[in-house]
Amino acid sequence: MIEIKDLAVKYGDFTAVKDLNIEIQDGEFFTFLGPSGCGKTTTLRCISGFEKASNGQIVASGTDLSGLLPEERNLGFVFQSYALFPSMNVYENIAFGLKAHKVNKKIIKSKVESVAQRTGITEHLNKKVSELSGGQQQRIAIARALVLEPRILLMDEPLSNLDAKLRISMREEIKRLQKELGITTIYVTHDQEEAMAISDRIAVFNLGRLEQIGTPQEIYNHPKSEFVARFIGDINLLSGKAEEKIKENCGYDKMQKCYIRPQKIMVQSKGQKQEDDDQICLTGKVAGFEFLGSYSKVKIDTGDDTVIYSTIFNNDNQFLIGDEVTLCIRKDDILAFGGDAHEQ
Ligand code: ATP
């Protein structure tokens, strides 16, 4: 287990990380997620030993890491910039760390070949780094970290230099590899979709503080703060008459802000859905319709300049701009924050 206890990092008067407490289980794929500048990399650098904490402790498997140099911590790193040696071929890049540890040549060969096979780069071992694509180079960076058999793998935005399609296939591979090896992994990203796809649990950071820790499902379906609700996935902030009606029916106070996820809004041709104890219905007009392949995004004008977005699967109804519709929202799906009442 890795325990981050009361961690704080200050740069002069500026506090980059404060009061951070996280426990990461053995074999877990754990992600630090948050907008730029929220302290993710600083925290990762404290774990790696490249950054000194102003306060707090990091303990891995019962050992306090603070007295150890980065190379004594038994960690593997994969960075956004692959940091490969351009003058060496792929084999030499992967073997570099083992050579530095004066490992026997035969053992190096077998370890490099084994990790190359796992990461799917065997055919590139004799190539120069410059001959390879971004995705292949990132795989080598991963192989180079794994060959040292670290107890913890740290990855800082490892996929940001790749195009969208490659990012998706690489994240699947990283997840598969991590599960196969069972290596505790801490991953940094600002991409919430990537975080949800790859992680067992996610810590959402904001302004150097922890907002929430949970599984992707927990943080998406049960965000503990307005920041998390807005940062993870699309969401509608209700306003105008729609907000009034919902607050009245659900007993929220005036100061609370009410949110609803687009896919939780059921859209039907006008009059088809009836209100009941569990759901509230509103009427509106379709103001926009975007076909996005497997789903469509419907923009609905509910009057008084209020628009609500809904997403529908494309085997459901199709709508034309100007269609009159009824939209129904289950009371349980409303996320309310602020005000006097407790947050849901
Ligand atoms: P990004 O996704 O952009 O990398 P991040 O969440 O990883 O962001 P950090 O790199 O941890 O953010 O930085 C947190 C804050 O600390 C930022 O405001 C940054 O400007 C500041 N910071 C980081 N390193 C230093 C430093 N050496 N000196 C002063 N301020 C720093």
Image (cartoon, rainbow, N blue to C red):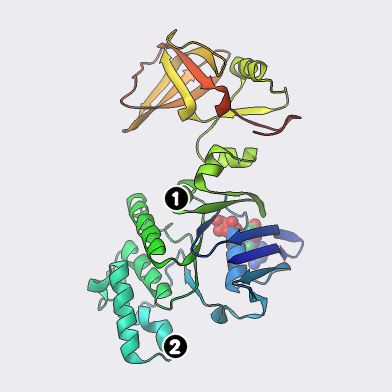
In the rendered image, which residue does mark 1 sit on?
A: 194
In the drawing, does residue 319 fall left or right of residue 195?
left
Which residue occupies the foreground of this view, 144 or 63? 63
Which residue is painted at 30% across and 83% down in the image?
110
Q: Looking at the picture, how far across and down is residue 170, in whole percent?
A: 35, 57
Q: Position of residue 108 (x, y in %)?
A: 34, 85
Q: In this view, does 229 lie above or below 187?
A: above
Where does residue 272 sit, x and y in percent of width and height? 42, 10
The residue under the point 45% across, 21% down is: 266
Determine whether the residue tagged by mark 2 lies in a helix, strand or loop.
helix
| Amino acid type of the residue tagged 1 in the rendering | Glu
Is residue 314 depicted above or below 231 in this figure? above
- Near mark 2 (Cα within 10 A), the count class, few <14, some 14-19 or many ≥20, is few
In the orientation shown, which residue stands out farthest toward the left?
Answer: 123
Q: Quadrant of residue 12?
A: bottom right
- 324 or 162, nearer to the observer: 324
Q: In which quarter of the image is the N terminus?
A: bottom right
| Residue 339, quarter of the rendered image | top right
**Residue 281, which numbered label?**
none
Q: Decide if residue 261 is in sight here.
A: yes
The residue indicated by pointer 2 is 100
Between 200 and 53, the one lying in front of the other is 200
Mark 1 or 2, nearer chain start: 2
Relative to 97, residue 246 above or below: above
The quadrant of the image that shows the C terminus is top right
- Residue 122 percent coordinates (x, y): 25, 73
Inter-mark Cα distance, 1 to 2: 34 Å
The residue shown at (67%, 76%) is 66
- Is residue 72 left or right of 120 when viewed as pictured? right
